Amino acid sequence: MERMVGTIVRGLRAPIFNQGDNIEQMVVDCVLQASKNEGFSVQDKDVVAITESVVARAQGNYASIDAIAKDVNSKFGEDTIGVIFPILSRNRFAICLRGIAKGAKKIVLMLSYPSDEVGNHLVDIDQLDEKGVNPWTDVLTEVQFRQYFGYNKHTFTGVDYIDYYKSLVQEYGIECEIIFSNNTKTILSYTKSVLACDIHTRFRTKKLLKANGDNKVFGLDDILSSSVDGSGYNEDYGLLGSNKSTEERVKLFPRNCQRIVDNIQNKLKEATRKKVEVMVYGDGAFKDPVGKIWELADPVVSPAYTAGLEGTPNEVKLKYLADNNFADLKGNALKNAISEYIKTKSSDLTGAMEAQGTTPRKLPDLIGSLCDLTSGSGDKGTPIVYIQGYFDNYTK
C-alpha cells in the first residue's frame, strides 16, 4: 500500500525536570516509552528535540539578581550606565534590569522605537507618520515621547513598558533617565559606559561604540559569562537567552549542550540500532502576523545539534515542476516524471529555477520552529518533540 503520510511530529509528555536530573537518560526513556505506548518504531533520521528550558533546569543553570548586580558593578563601578536597546519583556528582560539597577548608581535607558528588535511595539508606526516623527533621526526624551504619543499599553501584555522599566530601576533608589533613539551613538552624549542589551545586532552595536572613542562597552552576553560566587553562567551568551525564574533569579541559557545531544544519540543507537538526530531548541524564529512579534529572543534557535542536522534543505518545488517542466503531463505520468526528477536532482540546487521559493534557512532553525510551535510555551507538558519523515520527499 502506498504511504499517505509525510512528516509526523509528536510532542512527548515528560516528567518535570529538576536540578541534578540525568536529562540524557530521561529523554531516552521518554522516547522509548512513547514508541511503545503509541505504536511507532524508531527509524534512522528521526529527530529528537529537547527544549532548552528543561536542559538548563537539569543543569541548575540559575543566577540571582545579586550575582547580576555584582558582575555589573565589577565592570562599571560608579559610572552612569547607558542601558541600550533592551527588548520589552517581563519574562526576558525585566528581571535582568533589576539586577543591572541593583549594581548601578545611575542608568540612562535608551529604547528603540517604534518597536524593539523582536517587534514589541511602544507605539504604532502609523502614529509616527501622523506626528511627523522620524525614528531614524529623531532623538526623543521621555517628556517628548509622551507629548507625541501619550501612554500605550502592549497589545498582548497590557503593560506600559516605559513606566514599568523605570519603576524597576527606581525600586533601588537609582536615578533613571529614559531616551528614545535608534542611533547607537546617541548614548555617547549621555555616558561613555554602555551595556548593549540587543540580541542579534549586538556585534554591530558594540563595534560602533568601541570605534567612537575610549568607551567602556559590554553586552548582555558579557554579563555572567563566568560564575559569580558559584552562580550559573553561560560562557557564550551570558544573560542572553535567560528567562525569569522567580522575582529574585533568572534561568540562564543552557551550557555544554553538544555533549548532551551526542550522548542521547549514542544511547538511542545502543537501544534501537537506529541513528536518530538530536537537538536542543529555544525560540523558533517565526513572526506573529497580528502582534508583529518576531519569536527569537534567544541568541540562537539551537545551541547544539548532532552532525546530521547540519546544512540547509536541497529541495525542488513540486508545483513549479508540474506547471513548467511537465505541464503536458497528468495523473501517473506526471507523478512518475516528478518522482524521477527528484531522484536525479542535483546535490546543490542553488540558483536553480526549480528550487525557487524553497526555504534556505538552516535545518536546525527550521526544525526548531516546528518544535517550538509543537511544544508551545505554556502547559502542554511536552518539552520533548519527536519528528519522523522530515527528511523524506515525494519519492519515499
Image (spheres, rainbow, N blue to C red):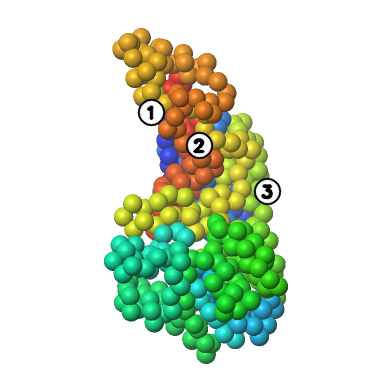
- Disc 1 to disc 2, C-alpha distance: 24 Å
Choose the circle earlier in sequence order: 1 or 3.
1
Q: Secondary structure at mark 3?
A: helix
Residue nearest the observer in this picture, 63 or 96: 96
Choose the circle earlier in sequence order: 1 or 2.
1
- Quadrant that contains the N terminus: top left
> Residue 348: x and y, percent?
57, 26
Residue tagged by mark 2?
360
Q: What residue is drawn where x is 47% and y is 60%?
A: 117
Which label lies toward us, 1 or 2? Answer: 2
Q: What residue is drawn where x is 64% and y is 38%?
A: 307
Q: Secondary structure at mark 1?
A: loop
Residue nearest the observer in this picture, 230 or 111: 111
| In-image side of 127 versus 34 (left or right) | left
Choose the circle earlier in sequence order: 3 or 2.
3
Q: Circle 3: is it few (<14), some (14-19), or many (20+) Cα within 10 Å?
A: some
> Residue 352: x and y, percent?
50, 25
Q: Circle 2: is it few (<14), some (14-19), or many (20+) Cα within 10 Å?
A: some
- Disc 1 to disc 3, C-alpha distance: 33 Å
> Which label belongs to residue 345?
none
**Above or below, 315 relative to 174:** above
Residue tagged by mark 1?
5
Q: Amino acid at mark 2?
A: Pro
Q: Amino acid at mark 3?
A: Arg
> Which label belongs to residue 259?
3
Q: What residue is drawn where x is 48% and y is 86%?
A: 170
